[in-house]
Every structure is written in C-alpha cells, then in structure tokens.
Image: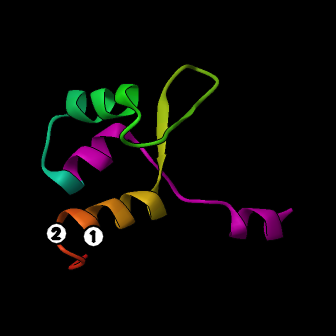
Amino acid sequence: MSEHLENAPRLLTAGEVAAVFRVADATVNRWARQGRVRCVRTPSGGQRFDADEIRRLFGEQTGGQS
C-alpha cells in the first residue's frame, strides 16, 4: 500500500494555491469553477489541487521561472 502512496499526487488546498499565486482563496475557487484549474472534491465537499499542475501553471504565468 505504501507503494501506492508514494506515487499518489500531492494535493494542495485552495489556500496553498492562493499563496503560490498571491491571490485570494476566492480567486482560486473561481478559477476552479471556470475550469481554469482542475480540482478534485473531497468527501466533505472541499477542493484539492494537484501540486504538479499548479507548478506547471505557475511556470507558465512567470515565463517558465518556477
């Protein structure tokens, strides 16, 4: 089972993504609703964002300087 966990994607909260882009949590939630960034829903209804995708998007935003 630990083998599966090692390969599992790192998931970030909206707050963590907001800190990366220096925007409000609400902005990240809006991006998710608009489909600009993909998220997965937790059983409790929260959103989580794939860290690798966020790094890629941040690199695009900063001209590849992540």
Tell me: 52 left or right of 43.
left
33, above or below 40, in the image: above
Which label number is shown at residue 2? none
2, above or below 13, in the image: below
Secondary structure under tag 1 reads helix
Relative to the observer, which residue lies in front, 53 or 14? 53
Q: Are marks 2 and 1 in contact (CB under 8 Å)?
A: yes
Secondary structure under tag 2 reads loop
- Quarter of the image with the N terminus is bottom right
Name which residue lies at 16% across and 69% down. 62
Question: Which quadrant of the structure image shows residue 42?
Answer: top right
Relative to the observer, which residue lies in front, 42 or 30? 30
Residue identifier under label 2: 62
- Secondary structure mostly taken by the magenta-highlighted segment of the chain: helix
Name which residue lies at 18% across and 74% down. 63
Residue 52 x/y as whole percent: 47, 64
Say what amino acid the circle numbered 1 marks.
Answer: Gly
Residue 14 x/y as whole percent: 34, 38
- Quarter of the image with the C terminus is bottom left
Say what amino acid the circle numbered 2 marks.
Answer: Thr
Question: Which quadrant of the structure image shows residue 56?
Answer: bottom left
Residue 45 x/y as whole percent: 54, 20
Residue 50 x/y as whole percent: 50, 53
Tell me: 4 left or right of 34.
right
Residue extending farthest to the top is 45
Task: Give the alpha-carbon distance from disc 2 to disc 1, as whole Å.
Answer: 5 Å
Q: Tell whether position 17 is magenta.
A: yes
Q: Which residues are magenta?
A: 1-19
7, above or below 21, in the image: below
